Image: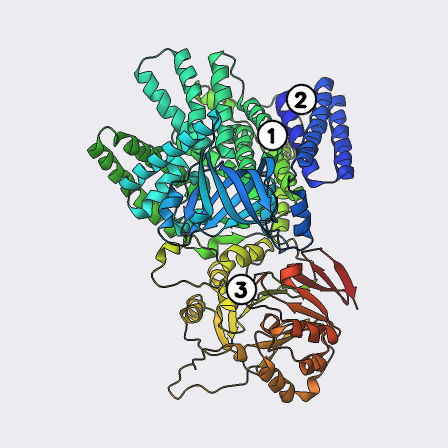
C-alpha cells in the first residue's frame, strides 16, 4: 500500500471525513495528531516519502474541513418551522409548488418520491420562494382509480401540492434506525404528507437537460422492466428486474429475505460484477464488428455512464463505473495502472462530490470488498500449492473466501447475522447467476424487440435456471440453526479485524516459485552434509533446525490467534458483564419489554404489533412489503444487542398490539418457552402464534396466580400475580375469550433487590382482585409498567397506593387515536409521586441494575439517573 501514494492519500481522506462525521472538534484534532505521528514514524522508517506523508496530513485536514463545510451548508431554509416543530407544535399545513426529482414509486395505496420545493405557503401567509429545499413526499391514495393518475407522474414534473410538512422521525430505540439522519445525508429535512392523488395538481414540466436525460432513463428503465415482467412469471419478474436492471420495487420480500439470510443480496444490487458482465458483453459485440482496439475502448468507456444511469446510479454501481472508465481511459493511453490506484481515484472523486457517501452502506461494502480482493487475493493465491487441475475452481474459492472475510465485519455491524452456509452459497450461486442467469435474462429481454419467439425461448431457459436457484436458496436458508447472530461490534474491532487480515496476508508463504519450477521441469535437490558440519549428532546438520521450522509457522499462528480472539470477543462481548437491564422498547401503540438478567439470559414480555384496518374489497391497498413491528423493529433490536436465544417469551394477552410482532421474533430467534394467559382469542393472529410456538418446539405455559416462580438465575425471579386459575372446558379445549384485556398476565419481577411490575392491559376490576388476593404483599415498587397504555379505566389511586411505585413507564404510540394516556390517569400517577416516562415522548426507557444501584436512561434526551 505504501508504494501507492494515491491509495494512502485516499485512506487519509477517508479518515478525515470519518473523524469529522463521528467526533467533535477536539476528537478530530486528536485523531489528526495521532495520524500525523504515525505518518512521521513511517517517513522516518523510510516506509513513506516525506512529501507523501505531508500530502496525507493535508488530505486528512481537507477532508475534515470539507465535511464540516458540507454540514454547515446542509440546513433547512424553513428554520422557523423547524424551531416550531422542536417546540412540540403540530405539523404545519402547507401549499407547496415543487418539482419531482426522483423516480416515482407506487406500493399499494402509497406513492413516494423526492422533490425540490420552489415555494411554500403556510399559516395563511403568502408563498415563500425557496432555493430548492428537498423534501420526501408521501401520498396515500384514497381510492383505486387514483392509481392510474399516480402512475403518470414522472421525474421533472412540476406540481402544486396540499399537505402537511413535518420533520422526519428520529431513532426512538437505542441502536434503532434513524430516519431523520438517513434523510439528512440526502440533504432532506422535511416529509410532505398528502392524503390523495387529488392533492397534487400538475403544472407542466420543468426544463433542463439534466432532468430530461434522467426522465428519459426512467422511461427506458420502466419500458425494459415492463418487457421483463411480460417475459417471466410473476414470482420471477421482480427478481429478474432487480438482477438485470436494479429495479427492486416488485421483488418478492420472502425471496429477498432468503437471499439476505445467505448473504446473497449483493447479487441484486447493481455493482462491479454487473458492470463487468456488461462490459464483457459489449466488448464481445464490438469485437465481432472488428473495430480497432482503441475504438473499442473508447466506445466501451462512453457506454459506462449510460449503464450507470440506466440502473439507478447507486453508490456501488457509480464506484464500479468510475473504476471502469478510469481503467479504460488508462488502457487507451497505454498507461494502465494497478486496481488499487483506480479504486482510490474513484473513492476520492465520489467523496469530493458528496462526503455523505462515506456513511452509505453500499459505498462501504463496495469499496471494502473491492479493496480486499485487490490486496488479499494475490498473496492468498500465491500461498496455495501448485495445481495442475482445478485452478479455476481454486481461484473462485479464494475470491469467495476473501470477499466473505472482508465483508464479514460490515455484515455483522449492519445486519447482525451471518449464515454458516453463506460461503458455499456464494461460491456456487454467484458465478451461476452472474454468467448464466443474468446474461440469459438480458439477451432474452433485448431479443424480444427483434425476435419475440427467440426471446421467449431464452426466457424459458432462464426461468428453469431461476427455479433451480430458488430451490437451492430455500434449501440452504431453511437451516435456522446455522444462521448465527452477532451483536454490532465497535469501530476499533472492525479496524483491528482488517489489520489482522492484512497481517495474515503479508505473512503467507509464496509458493509461486514452486509452481514456476514445476512448470519448467526443474527438480529440487538436497545438498548432502559435508565435513565440518558437526551440529547433527551423526556428524551432519539437518536442512532446517526445529527453531527454523517454527518461525514461519509462528508468523502465521500469531495473527491467526489474534483473529480467533477478535471473533471470540465479537461473539460475546458481554461475557463478563453482570449488569441486569430492563428495556421498555418503543413499538408505537403497543407493548414490548426486553429483560437481560445478570447472567446474560433474555426474557421478552410482549412484542408490539401493527394495527390494521383493512376493509373488504380493498386488496389494492396492500403493500408488497407492509410494515411489521416485529420484523422491522423488535427483531433488529434484539439481534443488534446479541440476543441469540430467548429463555422465556411472555404474551400477556392475545391482542394484536401485544403479540403482533412475536411471530417474527419466534421465526428469527430461537426461544425455549412461551408463557401466555391460557385462552384463545377467537382471532387468527393469536392462534397462529400458538401454532408457530408449538412448531418451533417451545414449551407452552398457561399462566395463573400461584404458578411456581420462574428463576432464570440467582438474581432474578418472576412471579405470576394474575390471571386466576381457570379450569378447562369439559371437552379439554382452551376457553375462547374475545375481550382479552382483563385476563392479561401480570408479573412481578425481583431483580437484584429491585422490583418491577408488568401489568398488560388490566383494568380496575383486575387491580382490585390482585390486591384482595395478596393483602400482605404490599411493598415499595421500583418500576411499574402502567396498564393499558394509560387508559382511563386502569391504574386506580388505590392500586398506586398499594404498590407505591417510584417510576411509572407508559408504553404508548404518538398521536394515537385512543387518546392514551388519559389525563385522569396521568393525574393519579403524579399524585402518587411516581416519575412518569412515556415511550411516545422519551422513546425507549432503559433501567440498569448494577452494584446495588438502579439507573435509568431514555433515548430521547438520554437522561441518566441513579437510584439506591
Q: Which residue is drawn at 65% across and 71% down?
A: 823
Counting residues from the start of the chain, the first of labels 1 and 3 encountered is: 1
**Label 3 vs label 2, nearer the camera:** 3
700 relative position to 494: left or right: left
354 relative position to 686: left or right: right
Q: Please state which of residues 197 and 653 is positioned toward the viewer in this rendering.
A: 197
Residue beneath label 2, please? Answer: 532
Mark 2 vs 1: CB contact within 8 A: no
**Label 2 vs label 1, nearer the camera:** 1
Residue beneath label 1, please? Answer: 351
| Circle on res. 608 | 3
Element on which disc 2 rests: loop
Counting residues from the start of the chain, the first of labels 2 and 1 encountered is: 1
How far across and down, in percent of the image, does residue 91 sit? Answer: 60, 52
Give the distance between the C-alpha atoms of the residues marked 2 and 1, in whole angstroms. Answer: 65 Å
Give the distance between the C-alpha atoms of the residues marked 1 and 3, in whole angstroms. Answer: 40 Å
The relative height of residue 284 versus residue 507 in the rendered view (above or below) is above
Amino acid at each position: 500500500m505504501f508504494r501507492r501514494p494515491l491509495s494512502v492519500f485516499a485512506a487519509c481522506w477517508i479518515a478525515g471525513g470519518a473523524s469529522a462525521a463521528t467526533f467533535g472538534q477536539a476528537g478530530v484534532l486528536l485523531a489528526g495528531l495521532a495520524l500525523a505521528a504515525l505518518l512521521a514514524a513511517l517517513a522516518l522508517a523510510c516506509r513513506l516519502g516525506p512529501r507523501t506523508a505531508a500530502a496525507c496530513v493535508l488530505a486528512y485536514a481537507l477532508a475534515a474541513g470539507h465535511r464540516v463545510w458540507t454540514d454547515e451548508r446542509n440546513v433547512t431554509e424553513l428554520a422557523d418551522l423547524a424551531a416550531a416543530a422542536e417546540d412540540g407544535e403540530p405539523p404545519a399545513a402547507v401549499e407547496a409548488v415543487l418539482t419531482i426529482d426522483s423516480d416515482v414509486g407506487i406500493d399499494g395505496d402509497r406513492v413516494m418520491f423526492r422533490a425540490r420545493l420552489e415555494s411554500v405557503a403556510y399559516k395563511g401567509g403568502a408563498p415563500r420562494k425557496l432555493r430548492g429545499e428537498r423534501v420526501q413526499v408521501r401520498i396515500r391514495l384514497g381510492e383505486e382509480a387514483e392509481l392510474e393518475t399516480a402512475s403518470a407522474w414522472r421525474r421533472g414534473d412540476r406540481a402544486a401540492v396540499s399537505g402537511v410538512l413535518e420533520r422526519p422521525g428520529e431513532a426512538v430505540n437505542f441502536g434503532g434506525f434513524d430516519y431523520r439522519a438517513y434523510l439528512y445525508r440526502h440533504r432532506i429535512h422535511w416529509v410532505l404528507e398528502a392524503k390523495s392523488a387529488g392533492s397534487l395538481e400538475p403544472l407542466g414540466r420543468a426544463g433542463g437537460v439534466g432532468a430530461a436525460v434522467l426522465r428519459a432513463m426512467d422511461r427506458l428503465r420502466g419500458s425494459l422492466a415492463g418487457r421483463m415482467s411480460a417475459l417471466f412469471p410473476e414470482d420471477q419478474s421482480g427478481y429478474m428486474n432487480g438482477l438485470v436492471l436494479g429495479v427492486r420495487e416488485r421483488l418478492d420480500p420472502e425471496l429477498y429475505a432468503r437471499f439476505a439470510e445467505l448473504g446473497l443480496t449483493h447479487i441484486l444490487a447493481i455493482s462491479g460484477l454487473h458492470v463487468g458482465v456488461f462490459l464483457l458483453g459489449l466488448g464481445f459485440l464490438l469485437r465481432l464488428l472488428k473495430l480497432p482496439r482503441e475504438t473499442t475502448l473508447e466506445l466501451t468507456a462512453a457506454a459506462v455512464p449510460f449503464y450507470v444511469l440506466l440502473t439507478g446510479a447507486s453508490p456501488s454501481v457509480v464506484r464500479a463505473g468510475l473504476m471502469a472508465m478510469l481503467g479504460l481511459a488508462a488502457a487507451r493511453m497505454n498507461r494502465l495502472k494497478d486496481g488499487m490506484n483506480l479504486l482510490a481515484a474513484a473513492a476520492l472523486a465520489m467523496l469530493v462530490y458528496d462526503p455523505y457517501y462515506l456513511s452509505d452502506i453500499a459505498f462501504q461494502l463496495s469499496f471494502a470488498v473491492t479493496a480486499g480482493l485487490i490486496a488479499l487475493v494475490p498473496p492468498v493465491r500465491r500461498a496455495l500449492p501448485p495445481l495442475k487441475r482445478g485452478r479455476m475452481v481454486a481461484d473462485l474459492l479464494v475470491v469467495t473466501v476473501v470477499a466473505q472475510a472482508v465483508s464479514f465485519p460490515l455484515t455483522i455491524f449492519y445486519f447482525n447475522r451471518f449464515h454458516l452456509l453463506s460461503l458455499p452459497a456464494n461460491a456456487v450461486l454467484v458465478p451461476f447467476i452472474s454468467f448464466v442467469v443474468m446474461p440469459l435474462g438480458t439477451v432474452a429481454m433485448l431479443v424480444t424487440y427483434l425476435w419475440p419467439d427467440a426471446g421467449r425461448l431464452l426466457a424459458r431457459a432462464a426461468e428453469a435456471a431461476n427455479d433451480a436457484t430458488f430451490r437451492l436458496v430455500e434449501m440452504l436458508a431453511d437451516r435456522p440453526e446455522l444462521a448465527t447472530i452477532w451483536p454490532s461490534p465497535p469501530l476499533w474491532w472492525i479496524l483491528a479485524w482488517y489489520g489482522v487480515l492484512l497481517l495474515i496476508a503479508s505473512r503467507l508463504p509464496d509458493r509461486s516459485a514452486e509452481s514456476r519450477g514445476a512448470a519448467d521441469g526443474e527438480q529440487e535437490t538436497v545438498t548432502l552434509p559435508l565435513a565440518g558440519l558437526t551440529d547433527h549428532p551423526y556428524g551432519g546438520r539437518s536442512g532446517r533446525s526445529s527453531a527454523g521450522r517454527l518461525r514461519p509457522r509462528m508468523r502465521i499462528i500469531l495473527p491467526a490467534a489474534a483473529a480467533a480472539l477478535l471473533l471470540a470477543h465479537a461473539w460475546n462481548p458481554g461475557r463478563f458483564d453482570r449488569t441486569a437491564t430492563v428495556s421498555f422498547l418503543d413499538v408505537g401503540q403497543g407493548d414490548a419489554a426486553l429483560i437481560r438478567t445478570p447472567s446474560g439470559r433474555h426474557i421478552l414480555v410482549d412484542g408490539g404489533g401493527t394495527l390494521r384496518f383493512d376493509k373488504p374489497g380493498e386488496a389494492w391497498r396492500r403493500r408488497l412489503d407492509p410494515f411489521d413491528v416485529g420484523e422491522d423493529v423488535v427483531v433488529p433490536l434484539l439481534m443488534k444487542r446479541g440476543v441469540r436465544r430467548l429463555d422465556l417469551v411472555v404474551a400477556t394477552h392475545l391482542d394484536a398490539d401485544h403479540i403482533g410482532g412475536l411471530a417474527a421474533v419466534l421465526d428469527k430467534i430461537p426461544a425455549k418457552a412461551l408463557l401466555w394467559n391460557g385462552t384463545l382469542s377467537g382471532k387468527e393472529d393469536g392462534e397462529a402464534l400458538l401454532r408457530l410456538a408449538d412448531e418451533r418446539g417451545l414449551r407452552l405455559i398457561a399462566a395463573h396466580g400461584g404458578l411456581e416462580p420462574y428463576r432464570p438465575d440467582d438474581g432474578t425471579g418472576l412471579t405470576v400475580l394474575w390471571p386466576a386459575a381457570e379450569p378447562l372446558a369439559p371437552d379439554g379445549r382452551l376457553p375462547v375469550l374475545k375481550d382479552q384485556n382483563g385476563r392479561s398476565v401480570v408479573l412481578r419481577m425481583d431483580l437484584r433487590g429491585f422490583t418491577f411490575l408488568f401489568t398488560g392491559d388490566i383494568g380496575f376490576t383486575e387491580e382490585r382482585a390482585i390486591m384482595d388476593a395478596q393483602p400482605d404483599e404490599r411493598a415499595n415498587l421500583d418500576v411499574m409498567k402502567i396498564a393499558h397504555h394509560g387508559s382511563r379505566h386502569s391504574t386506580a389511586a388505590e392500586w398506586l397506593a398499594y404498590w407505591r411505585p417510584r417510576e411509572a413507564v407508559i408504553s404508548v404510540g404518538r398521536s394515537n387515536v385512543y387518546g392514551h394516556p388519559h389525563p385522569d390517569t396521568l393525574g393519579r400517577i403524579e399524585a402518587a409521586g411516581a416519575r412518569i416516562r412515556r415511550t411516545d415522548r422519551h422513546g425507549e426507557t432503559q433501567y440498569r441494575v448494577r452494584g446495588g444501584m438502579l439507573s435509568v436512561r431514555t433515548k430521547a434526551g438520554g437522561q441518566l439517573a441513579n437510584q439506591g
